[in-house]
Amino acid sequence: ASALAEPAPKSPIQVSETVVDFGLVDPHAIPMKTIKITNAGEEPVTLTGVDITCICTKAELSKMVLRPGESAEVKISLDLSDYPGNSVHSRVQIGVKDDSVSVPTIEVDAEIQPELVVNPNPLDFGAVKKGRSTEATLLVTQGTNVPYSITLVEPTEGLEASLTSTESDSTSQSVAVKLLPNVKARRFQGKLI
């Protein structure tokens, strides 16, 4: 006769949400969401703290001991002021004193709104006959509430660029880009300052 493995005991800790999706967030804002954890067991559970996988994610527990039937709040926030990426995918793990008690991992996701949006991106000159030049215009638009102003355009070799509109109260600026004649076919990169 073969012995059947017993299923793992169900954790007494229930989490109201295991995925916190902040959606599209302004990099200068500090979005926050509160979720609830509940002790659905018959014994008190002592929480020991939180572990996070990204320094941009913060999590705070409202209490450290949950009696049977009690709940605590977990305040999860993002601080993206020094975050270099375009998106956040982190995890929050709540620690417990009793190793036999598990708590589901909370996944935290967000897409970071770019401060500047460049259209078209990428800029494609299309097919250009050898010895000819062509021009195109980039529109640079403010993506967040933080004002900006392009003061200098530094094109790479083979390109010329200049500001074509510089209204200081506008949320967008235009940049004319010219592909110079007799340039070898290749990818170009430039930067806006």
Image: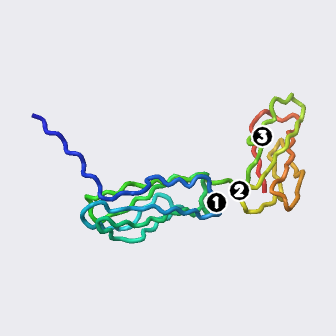
The amino acid type found where label 1 is placed reads Pro
* In the displayed structure image, the side of residue 163 where residue 114 appears, left or right: left
Instruction: Quickly name the residue at label 3.
Output: 123
N-terminal-most mark, 2 or 1: 1
Q: Which residue is at the front of the view, 128 or 5?
A: 5
- Kindly indicate whether the residue at mark 1 contacts the one at mark 2 (C-beta within 8 angstroms): yes
Q: Position of residue 140 (x, y in %)?
A: 79, 51
Residue drawn at (42%, 62%), measured in percent from left and top?
Answer: 36
- Kindly indicate whether the residue at mark 3 contacts the one at mark 2 (C-beta within 8 angstroms): no
Occupied quadrant, residue 147:
bottom right
Q: Position of residue 167 (x, y in %)?
A: 88, 58
Instruction: Quickly name the residue at label 1.
Output: 27
Q: State the CA–CA distance, disc 1 to disc 3.
A: 25 Å
Whether residue 72 is situated above or below residue 124 in the rendered picture: below
Q: Which residue is at the front of the view, 115 or 191?
A: 115
- Which numbered dot is residue 115? 2
- Name the secondary structure under disc 1: loop
